[in-house]
Every structure is written in structure tokens, then in C-alpha cells.
Image (cartoon, grey):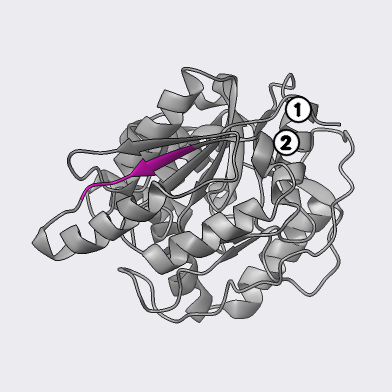
């Protein structure tokens, strides 16, 4: 029995239909009734957003099925980057661990069990930065769980100790990557554009929290635990939001069974790394553009 249940931080903006799917998926998890839910509702950017935001906030007040629902309504528009950074930090001022989801992530009924079991299992192991719930739709068989360097952003959890390593200044991260000769490694062996994304953040072409979180963990030689079968599916690539079209590259089947989670050596899985790398290489050159959209989706409200 899991006794140390992590709070859930859910970030939303104006897409009511997507949000309802996320909430229903959360409630289908057996641990939802034992979970404190913190919902961070961003404010409208302009008059065009106002009605949709109001509809979302009306719905938020009807949500039940959790130990407690805490609604934080921002009085001005934060944007996803500031919202994630401040929201996660606020929850971690109260708790030592948190599960983070956004309003476009549909979840397996086994998501909360996996996240809580893994967060408890690795909470005192400093090499582990986070737990991730999404898995690429690769054809090869992956281990039940595996480690990769750095962090990721689609349904994840972390601890206060790891979040303290988060470096907000992109230029600091880039300089360290360059000085340590880690650019190719940071780009997953040169097959994805993480470094360019970080450079764009520095140049204010984007405001990605996710690339800075990944770089922070990567530079600190920290690992993230990934599931062999995906417990998260992004439903935001349906053409309804900014920076998102109907791309199905990342569409994956949600696991309909629980994952076997056991303590394992804290080293990057060479097998899983090569499977992921081959997936990226097989999809080039179009995939590079798609992977950049994936990263962008981690810092823009849709």
C-alpha cells in the first residue's frame, strides 16, 4: 500500500474540453481520492480569451473526487513557463514531492500508481531528478522502466531536492554545456535540436521552462525514470492550440496494465537510449521540426 501520496499540480488555461478529459482520466486512477489536487488557472491574455477562461474556472469549482481540490486563479496572465516554475515551486514549499501535469495530457488509469511508487522508491537517491510518464511510440521492446539523462515534460514528478537544481538563466546552462563539451550529448547524440532550443530561449524567441529543466538536470548528471509503456498521451496536437497542428508523431497507446517498478541501478539505459536515438534518426529530417514542436508544447499554453 502506498502511504506517501504526492500532491498533483495541474496547469490549465482556456481549453475546457481538453481539461475535462484530463480530470476524468485522473479520476479513473485509484489513488485520485487520496490525492491533493492543486489547479493553477492562468488568467486571460486579452479579451478574446476571457470567456473561455471564465468557463474553465466555472468548471474547476465543480470538480470532486480528490482528497482536496485547491484552485489557484492567477489575476494576470503568467504564460506557461512562469506558471509552471512558480506553481511547482509553490507546491514544493509545502511538500517534498509533486506530480506535474498540464491540461492536454490524457492519463492511463495506472499513472498515479506508477508516479507515486517511483517517487517513493527513488526519493532519497540524489542521482534521480524526476519520474516521467510518457514514452515515445517506438516499435522495439523497452524495459519495464529505464533511466535516461536529464528530464522531460509530459506528465512528470520530482522532489524539492531536485527542483533546487533548476537554473533559470539559459545562458548559464549553455556556457556550461559548451565548456564541458556536452553539446552533442545534450542533443541526444546529435539527432535532436535541444541546443538550438536553448539558444532560442536565450534570444527570447521562446520562453521554455522545459529545456532549462532538462539542461539543469543533464548538467548535474541526473537521471529521469521512464516507463516502458506510456502512461501519458498528449491530446493537444489536434489543431486547437497555438504552436500545435494535427501532427500525430507522438501519438501513443496508453498502457492498460500496471508497470512493474523495482529499484534498479542509477545508470542510463544504453538499450533504451539507442532505441530512442534510432527512432529519431529514422524520422529525420521532418522529425527535427516535430521534436522542436514537442519541446515548444512544453512551454506554451495552447
Label 1, residues with CA under 10 Å away: few <14, some 14-19, many ≥20:
some
Task: Please say whether residue 137 is one of the residues in the magenta stretch.
Answer: no
Question: Please, which residue is most extreme toward the left here?
Answer: 47
Q: Position of residue 59 (x, y in %)?
A: 38, 55
Task: Please say whether residue 40 is one of the residues in the magenta stretch.
Answer: yes
Q: 212 or 51: which is nearer to us?
A: 51
Label 2, residues with CA under 10 Å away: few <14, some 14-19, many ≥20:
many
Residue drawn 57% across and 77% down?
Answer: 249
- Residue 203 falls left or right of residue 109: left
Residue drawn 63% across and 73% down?
Answer: 281
Judging by the rendered image, the residue that carries numbered circle 2 is 116
- Residue 89 falls left or right of residue 161: left
Q: Is residue 269 above or below residue 217?
A: below
The disc label shown at residue 120, or none? 1
Q: Which residues are magenta?
A: 38-43
Residue drawn 38% across and 72% down?
Answer: 244
Residue drawn 17% across and 41% down?
Answer: 76
Residue 241 in which image quadrant: bottom left
Residue 117 in which image quadrant: top right
Q: Is residue 271 above or below residue 140?
A: above
Q: Is residue 194 above or below residue 181?
A: below
Q: Position of residue 64 (x, y in %)?
A: 53, 46
Disc 1 vs disc 2: Cβ atoms closer than 8 Å?
Answer: yes
Indicate the quadrant containing the C terminus: top left, top right, bottom left or bottom right.
bottom left
Of helix, strand and loop, which mostly describes the magenta segment?
A: strand
- Residue 206 falls left or right of residue 47: right
Q: Secondary structure at mark 1?
A: helix
Indicate the quadrant containing the N terminus: top left, top right, bottom left or bottom right.
top right
Q: Position of residue 29 (x, y in %)?
A: 71, 51
Determine if residue 271 is in view. Answer: yes
Amino acid at each position: 500500500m502506498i502511504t506517501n501520496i504526492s500532491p498533483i499540480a495541474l496547469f490549465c488555461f482556456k481549453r475546457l474540453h481538453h481539461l475535462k478529459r484530463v480530470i476524468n482520466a485522473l479520476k479513473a486512477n485509484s489513488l485520485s481520492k487520496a490525492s491533493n489536487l492543486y489547479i493553477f488557472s492562468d488568467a486571460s491574455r486579452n479579451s478574446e480569451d476571457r470567456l473561455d477562461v471564465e468557463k474553465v474556472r466555472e468548471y474547476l469549482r465543480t470538480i470532486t473526487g480528490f482528497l482536496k481540490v485547491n484552485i489557484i486563479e492567477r489575476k494576470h496572465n503568467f504564460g506557461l513557463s512562469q506558471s509552471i516554475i512558480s506553481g511547482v515551486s509553490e507546491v514544493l514549499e509545502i511538500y517534498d514531492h509533486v506530480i506535474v501535469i498540464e491540461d492536454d495530457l490524457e492519463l492511463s488509469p495506472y499513472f498515479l500508481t506508477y508516479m507515486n511508487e517511483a517517487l517513493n522508491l527513488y526519493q532519497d537517491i540524489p542521482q534521480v531528478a524526476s519520474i516521467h510518464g510518457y514514452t515515445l511510440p517506438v516499435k522495439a521492446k523497452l524495459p519495464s522502466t529505464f533511466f535516461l539523462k536529464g528530464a522531460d515534460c509530459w506528465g512528470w514528478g520530482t522532489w524539492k531536492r531536485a527542483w533546487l537544481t533548476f537554473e533559470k538563466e539559459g545562458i548559464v546552462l549553455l556556457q556550461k554545456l559548451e565548456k564541458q563539451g556536452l553539446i552533442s550529448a545534450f542533443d541526444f547524440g546529435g539527432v535532436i535540436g535541444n541546443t538550438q532550443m536553448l539558444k532560442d530561449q536565450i534570444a527570447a524567441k521562446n520562453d521554455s521552462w522545459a529545456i532549462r529543466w532538462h539542461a539543469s538536470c543533464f548538467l548535474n548528471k541526473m537521471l529521469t525514470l521512464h516507463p516502458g509503456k506510456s502512461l501519458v498521451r498528449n491530446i493537444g496536437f489536434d489543431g486547437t492550440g497555438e504552436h500545435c497542428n494535427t501532427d500525430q508523431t507522438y501519438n501513443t497507446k496508453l498502457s492498460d496494465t500496471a508497470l512493474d517498478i523495482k529499484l534498479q541501478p542509477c545508470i542510463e539505459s544504453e538499450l533504451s537510449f539507442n532505441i530512442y536515438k534510432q527512432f529519431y534518426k529514422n524520422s529525420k529530417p521532418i522529425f527535427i521540426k516535430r521534436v522542436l514542436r514537442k519541446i515548444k508544447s512544453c512551454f506554451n499554453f495552447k
